[in-house]
Amino acid sequence: MIRPAIHSDVPRLVELAILLHATSNYSTMAFDAEKTGNFMRELIDGLGVVFVAEVGGEVVGGVAAGITDQWFSNDLIVFDYSIFIDPSRRSGITAMRLVNTLKEWGRIKGAKQLHMGIGTGIHVEGTVKLYQACGLNHFGPLMMMEL
């Protein structure tokens, strides 16, 4: 089941974020669990949105996202901060349900576009296929360098 996150989900969301961080391109950066939890609470309170995937009463994944206007337009876009799935549940269906829920939320909010990136470096080819199966189109690369 996919549902909006509530404050009591935050500790589990932070656990999932720690797992993601440790195996991602971001692992060279410090992880601040308190900051992460506070940010999730702010998103839940309306700064953006967090949806969770729940199986048997356990949160096994989530997507954190925001909505903003384009810098050149008043049209709205939805963007993901992160999608995080328990490694044992990364079969695709959970992520697909989270992405589709985020798409519907964006439509309800009046957004014109959904932007999702793959900055973690985890299962890039599979994630591209997943996003394409959800209707997203490749529109350019995301670049990064260590400073």
Image: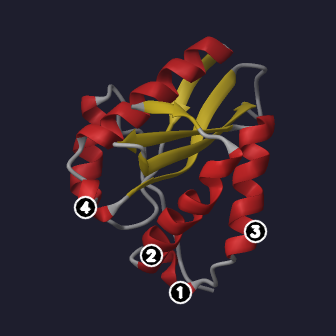
Q: Secondary structure at mark 2?
A: helix
Name the residue carrying label 3. Answer: 35
- For residue 147, which quarter of the picture? bottom right
Q: Nearer the viewer, residue 25 or 31?
A: 31
Q: Does 121 sit left or right of 5 as displayed?
A: left
Q: Which mark is residue 47?
A: none
Q: Are marks 4 and 1 in contact (CB under 8 Å)?
A: no
Q: How is the image coloured?
A: secondary structure
Tell us which disc is closer to us: 4 or 2.
Answer: 4
Name the residue carrying label 4. Answer: 88
Q: Residues within 10 Å of mark 2 (few under 14, many from 20)?
A: some
Label located before the other in sequence (3 or 2)? 2
Q: Are marks 4 and 2 in contact (CB under 8 Å)?
A: no
Q: Residues within 10 Å of mark 4 (few under 14, many from 20)?
A: few
Marks 3 and 2, how far apart at CA: 19 Å
Residue type, label 3: Lys
User: Number of labelled discs?
Assistant: 4
Q: Are marks 2 and 1 in contact (CB under 8 Å)?
A: yes
Q: Nearer the viewer, residue 9 or 99?
A: 9
Residue type, label 2: Asn
In this rendering, the answer to whether 75 lies above or below 36 is above
Residue 66 in percent (x, y) is at 67, 39
Label located before the other in sequence (1 or 3)? 1
Q: Are marks 3 and 2 in contact (CB under 8 Å)?
A: no
Marks 4 and 2, how far apart at CA: 20 Å
Q: Residue placed at 36% from the left, 60% from the top?
A: 86
Name the residue carrying label 2. Answer: 25
Label located before the other in sequence (3 or 4)? 3
Tell us which disc is closer to us: 3 or 4.
Answer: 4
Name the residue carrying label 1. Answer: 28
Q: Quarter of the image containing the N terminus?
A: top left
In this rendering, the answer to whether 117 lies above or below 65 is below
